[in-house]
Amino acid sequence: MKVICETERLIVRQFELSDAVFITQLLNDDLFIRYIGDKKVRTHENAINYLKTGPMASYEKHGFGLNLVCLKEAFTPIGMCGLLKRDELESPDLGYAFLPEYSGKGYAKEAAENTLKTVMKTGSLDKVLAVTLPDNFRSNKLLETIGFRFKETIELYGSQNNLYEYRSL
């Protein structure tokens, strides 16, 4: 198990194939589908394939990717957070998603802030982007809270998105 960072309440670690049940749950949540997209992960096999070709392939290729976020005290998986490198964007971008029962408790801010700082340092990155739908108000506010600045509206995957930029000092 490779831990990316820890906070007082959370552990952020790389995904393992044993996280497939959680991935199926998270990727089929209504808010995930609405604000991020339908990844068509419906079965255990779909989840294994998603983990292998998504986060795990990214760890190998880029040295970073999406990671599991779990509560420290019981190791309960509550979401994911990490950096992605999309061909459509010039720099890596921050991605995160949490189960609805863990929203509004500061976990996303805690995970995003700490993951961002750690991965920028270990990956020698000076700029990270973030992309959100304009009506995803909570996500837009979170990005601004942790230091991202709105740059422009872009078209990505057929819809308008807000593009944010974060630069290390």
Image (spheres, rainbow, N blue to C red):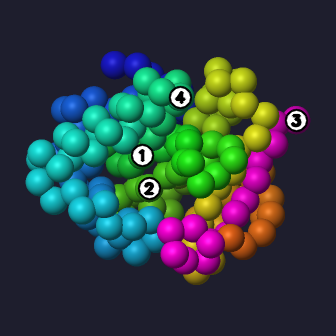
Mark 3 and 4 residues: CB-CB less than 8 Å, in contact? no
Disc marking residue 68: none
User: Horizontal and vertical percent for residue 27?
Assistant: 30, 58
Dot placed on the residue nearer the N-terminal end, 3 or 4: 4
- For disc 1, the marked residue is 80
Q: Residues within 10 Å of mark 1 (few under 14, many from 20)?
A: many
> Residue at position x 64%, y 38% from top?
116
Q: What whole-number distance in Å separates the C-alpha atoms at marks 2 and 1? A: 5 Å
Disc marking residue 62: 4
> Residue at position x 61%, y 77% from top?
160
- For disc 2, the marked residue is 97
Mark 2 and 4 residues: CB-CB less than 8 Å, in contact? no
Q: Is residue 16 left or right of residue 128?
A: left
Give the extent of the magenta segment.
155-169
Dot placed on the residue nearer the N-terminal end, 2 or 4: 4
- For disc 3, the marked residue is 169
Q: Is residue 33 left or right of residue 10?
A: left
Q: Eyeballing the image, is 133 above or below 92? A: below
- Which of these two is toward me, 92 or 28? 92
Dot placed on the residue nearer the N-terminal end, 2 or 1: 1
Q: Residues within 10 Å of mark 3 (few under 14, many from 20)?
A: few
Mark 3 and 1 residues: CB-CB less than 8 Å, in contact? no
Q: Amino acid at mark 3?
A: Leu
